Image: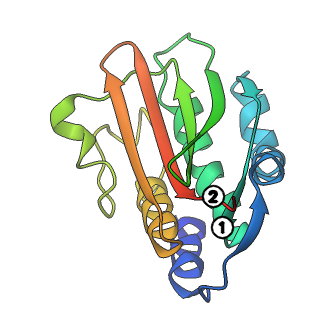
Amino acid sequence: MIHDRLNYSKVSRFRRSLRATDLAEAIDDALNLMESELSSRCAHVLVQGPMYQVMAHAPTLVQCVANLLSNAVKFVAPGVEPRVRLRAEERAGLVRLWVEDNGIGITVEDCGRIFGAVERLHGVERYPGAGIGLTVARHGIERMGGLVGVDSIPGKGSRFWLELPGTG
């Protein structure tokens, strides 16, 4: 929990010096950061190209992607191996990164709540964590001039996305 609060503090304090950042490199860095958790959960992660350049603060982007990955592999039904697909698309000067999973899903009513500070939909005994990962992701992406969101179907999985200005 202390680690999560430190991450929130870092995201809140970074200077808004945005630079052209390779999304593929940020994903690789996030995967390296998450290596132990991905391995322990027997997660299958597929990164589908192409990836693009975005205007971002690279360390914050890496943390945001890692937080989305962590949720994608954590919130699965018992006995289910997590499967996550990352893909990106360009539209109207923006780049949207999708993080799609085969998890437990989220009701429409709860989709707006999950990005709030320490908002938990499930007990810590079943799904451990501080409940701050999505808050950190939302705050970090918004500080970089972007947006985050989710499309989800309970029992079928979720499609989280983050959107940042492209460089082209």
Q: Is residue 128 visible?
A: no
Determine the image quadrant of residue 41.
Answer: top right
Above or below, 84 against 168 in this view is above
* Label 1: element kind: strand
Determine the image quadrant of residue 37.
Answer: top right
Residue ID for mark 1: 55
The structure's colour scheme is rainbow
In the picture provided, is 63 more to the left or to the right than 102? right
As drawn, which residue projects farthest toward the left? 109
| The one of 52 and 46 positioned closer to us in this rendering | 52
| The one of 118 and 58 positioned closer to us in this rendering | 58
**Residue depicted at 47% across the width and 21% down the height:** 103
Q: Are marks 1 and 2 in contact (CB under 8 Å)?
A: yes
* Label 2: element kind: loop
Residue type (three-letter) at the residue carrying disc 1: Met
Q: Residues within 10 Å of mark 2 (few under 14, many from 20)?
A: some
> Residue 140: x, y in percent?
52, 68
**Residue depicted at 29% across the width and 59% down the height:** 116
| The one of 143 and 38 positioned closer to us in this rendering | 143
**Residue depicted at 54% across the width and 27% down the height:** 100
Above or below, 14 against 33 in this view is below
Residue ID for mark 2: 166
| The one of 7 and 62 positioned closer to us in this rendering | 62
**Residue depicted at 76% across the width and 63% down the height:** 21
